[in-house]
Amino acid sequence: MPAGTLYIVATPIGNLEDMTFRAVRVLGEVDLIAAEDTRHTRKLLTHFGISRPLVSYFDHNQQIKGQQIIAALAEGKNVALVSDAGTPCISDPGYQLVRDAAAAGVNVVPLPGGCAAIAALSASGLPTDEFTFVGFLPNRQGKRRERLSSLAAEPRLLVFYEAPHRLAATLSDMADLFGDRNAVVARELTKIYEEIARDRLPELARRFTETPARGEVVILVAAGEPQPEHAPPDMEDMLRTALAAGCTVKEAVQRVTALSGASRSAVYAVALVLKEKG
Ligand code: SAM
């Protein structure tokens, strides 16, 4: 018997009108729906008049449930995977199931639809040609700042998911570690109180500290300006030329400092080494 198909079905991130025709049809046709939270998904299915068997599939039971789902697929059953909102596997459970299904020779079919990160990017007004999806930061401030520091030199727009009660603290850490960059807080997308706040990071941090926000949020941070090189690679060459042309160390350091933009002490240190080498 041929294996069934695993459908990865995106669902709305708030507004039920964003459900696709295809998602409604496929969810109504499959043998089994694997859901992050079956009670939550049952409400969605009821809204669309769908009644199919549901099985829970979330982070802490994914190993055991995953095996049962793969067994059902191997028996030729068609299964749909959904999360509470948006696209499964995007900061949501699912990738292990997809990996194992693919390894078992099961056909995996994505049904695109809602995704908070993509919705936020599309309405941000920031350059979106290249971006890095970070997702959730660590909850604890020390680890969060460590992670943010490691992203400070990232040359692409950064995309974060964050819980509302941590928004102000996270924006303050970002303002501190990333500096005065353009950023966007996209809140409650597709819902009644949707808000897209576009401003500089310190201003957003100040605003959401003064007036704490409710609801779900995506934070986008524009890429930083490239940092000037402290010691341009040609600084040594310039010094060598100046010394060979008969300049004293003092004269060479003065000229090369002015030309290279490197600090006088850095140029001086290199000049002494070159002079010693002769
Ligand atoms: N898989 C989902 C997706 O495709 O976007 C993301 C799931 S993740 C567990 C939930 C996070 O997504 C929230 O904490 C928030 O950062 C973001 N999010 C989800 N819905 C949102 C909405 N309507 N507006 C803004 N952010 C949202």
Image (cartoon, rainbow, N blue to C red):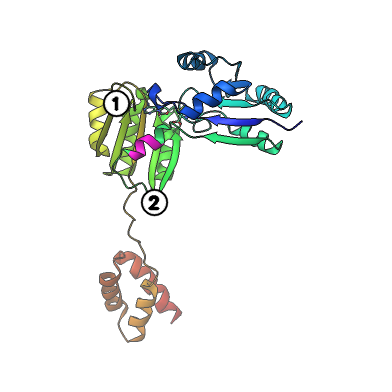
Q: For the point 70% across and 24% down, which residue is it?
A: 72
Residue type for callout 2: Pro
The x and y percentages for residue 278 are 43, 82
Count the numbered circles shown: 2
Q: Earlier in the sequence, mark 2 or mark 1?
A: 2
Residue type for callout 1: Glu
Left or right: where does residue 67 sit relative to residue 275?
Answer: right
Q: Is mark 1 within 8 Å of ligand 1?
A: yes
- Position of residue 210 relative to residue 142, above or below, is above
- Position of residue 84 relative to residue 120, above or below, is above
Quarter of the image for the N terminus: give it.
top right
Left or right: where does residue 132 sit relative to residue 104?
Answer: left
Label 1 belongs to which residue?
A: 194
| Nearer to us: label 2 or label 1 | 1
Which element is circle 1 on?
A: loop
- Position of residue 39 relative to residue 13, above or below, is above
Neighbour class for label 1 at 10 Å: few (<14), some, many (≥20)?
Answer: some
The x and y percentages for residue 186 are 32, 32
Q: For the point 50% across and 29% down, which residue is it?
A: 22
Q: Is residue 29 magenta?
A: no
Neighbour class for label 2 at 10 Å: few (<14), some, many (≥20)?
Answer: some
Q: Which mark is residue 155?
A: 2
Q: For the point 52% across and 16% down, which residue is it?
A: 50
Q: Nearer the viewer, residue 135 or 118?
A: 118
Q: For the stretch drawn in magenta, what is the main secondary structure?
A: helix
The answer to which image quadrant residue 260 occupies is bottom left
Magenta region: 118-122
Left or right: where does residue 149 sit relative to residue 46?
Answer: left
